[in-house]
Image (cartoon, rainbow, N blue to C red):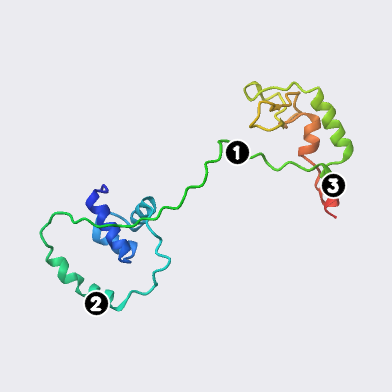
C-alpha cells in the first residue's frame, strides 16, 4: 500500500470530520490504525484536542446510513479544490551530536586527599586522544568534549578497570563512604 494523493486527501478529510484512526483505516483499506496515526503525525494534522470525545448526533445518523452509501459509490469525478488549514508546531533545535557526559562527582563528594592525588596525576597524564586509547590506557575524560582542549588521561590502567589508580579512586568508591557523606 502506498500513500497516493487521493488516499492522503481522504485521510485528511475524514480526520478533520473527527473520525477515528480505526474508522479511517477501515475506509482506506490495506492500512492499519497505527499507519493512519503515523501519517497524521507526519502530515502535522491537529490532534483534535478541542473535539469532543462523543460524536455529534448527526454523525451517529450518518454512520447508520454509511453502509447504504458504500454500496453505491459514485463515479470518480474531478478532484475539487479544498482549503485545508494545517498548523505545524515549530521544531526543537537540533542538539549537536554526542552524548552528554555522565554526572561527575562534585568536589565536596570526594575526599580532599583523593582530589589532590587526582590533580597531581592529571599533571603527569599522557593527554591522549580517543584514537590513541587502548585496553591498557586510562580512559578518564578530562575537559569539555566540544572543545579542542579535551583529552583522556592515558596512564596505565589498574588491573580489570578502565582507569588508572587515581581515577579508580574517584570512580569506584566504597558504599559505606558514600552513605556517610549523605548524612
Of mark 2 and mark 1, the one earlier in the sequence is: 2
In the rendered image, which quarter contains the C terminus? bottom right
Instruction: Estimate the spatial distance between the alpha carbons at disc 2 and disc 1, rounded to whole Å.
Output: 55 Å
Of mark 1 and mark 3, the one earlier in the sequence is: 1
State the SS at label 1. Answer: loop
Say left or right for 166 vs 94: right
Q: On the image, which quarter does residue 85 sit in?
A: bottom left
Say which residue label 3 marks. Answer: 177
114 or 100: nearer the viewer: 100
149 or 172: nearer the viewer: 149
Instruction: Estimate the spatial distance between the alpha carbons at disc 2 and disc 3, rounded to whole Å.
Output: 72 Å
Say which residue label 1 marks. Answer: 99
Please provide percent x and percent y for residue 52.
39, 72
Q: Residue drawn 63% across and 32% down? A: 146
Q: Tell me if label 2 and label 3 are in contact, CB under 8 Å.
A: no
Say left or right for 47 vs 69: right
Say which residue label 2 marks. Answer: 61
130 or 144: nearer the viewer: 144
Label 1 Cα crowd, 10 Å radius (few <14 / some 14-19 / many 20+):
few
Please provide percent x and percent y for residue 111.
87, 41
Residue farthest left in this picture: 75
Please provide percent x and percent y for residue 27.
24, 61
Say left or right for 130 vs 104: left
Of mark 2 and mark 3, the one earlier in the sequence is: 2
Label 3 Cα crowd, 10 Å radius (few <14 / some 14-19 / many 20+):
few
State the SS at label 2. Answer: helix
How many numbered marks are there? 3
Amino acid at each position: 500500500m502506498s500513500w497516493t494523493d487521493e488516499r492522503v486527501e481522504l485521510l485528511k478529510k475524514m480526520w478533520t470530520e473527527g473520525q477515528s484512526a480505526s474508522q479511517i483505516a477501515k475506509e482506506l483499506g490495506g492500512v492499519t490504525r497505527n499507519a493512519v496515526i503515523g501519517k497524521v503525525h507526519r502530515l502535522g494534522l491537529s490532534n483534535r484536542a478541542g473535539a469532543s470525545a462523543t460524536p455529534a448526533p448527526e454523525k451517529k445518523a450518518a454512520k447508520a446510513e454509511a453502509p447504504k452509501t458504500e454500496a453505491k459509490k459514485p463515479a470518480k469525478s474531478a478532484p475539487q479544490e479544498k482549503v485545508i488549514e494545517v498548523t505545524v508546531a515549530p521544531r526543537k533545535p537540533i542538539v549537536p551530536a554526542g552524548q552528554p557526559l555522565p554526572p561527575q562527582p562534585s568536589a565536596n563528594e570526594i575526599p580532599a586527599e583523593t582530589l589532590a592525588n587526582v590533580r597531581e596525576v592529571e599533571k603527569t597524564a599522557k593527554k591522549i586522544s580517543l584514537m590513541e586509547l587502548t585496553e591498557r590506557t586510562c580512559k578518564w575524560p578530562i575537559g569539555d568534549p566540544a572543545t579542542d582542549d579535551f583529552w583522556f588521561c592515558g596512564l596505565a590502567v589498574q588491573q580489570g578497570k578502565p582507569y588508572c589508580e587515581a581515577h579508580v579512586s574517584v570512580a569506584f568508591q566504597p558504599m559505606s563512604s558514600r552513605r556517610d557523606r549523605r548524612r
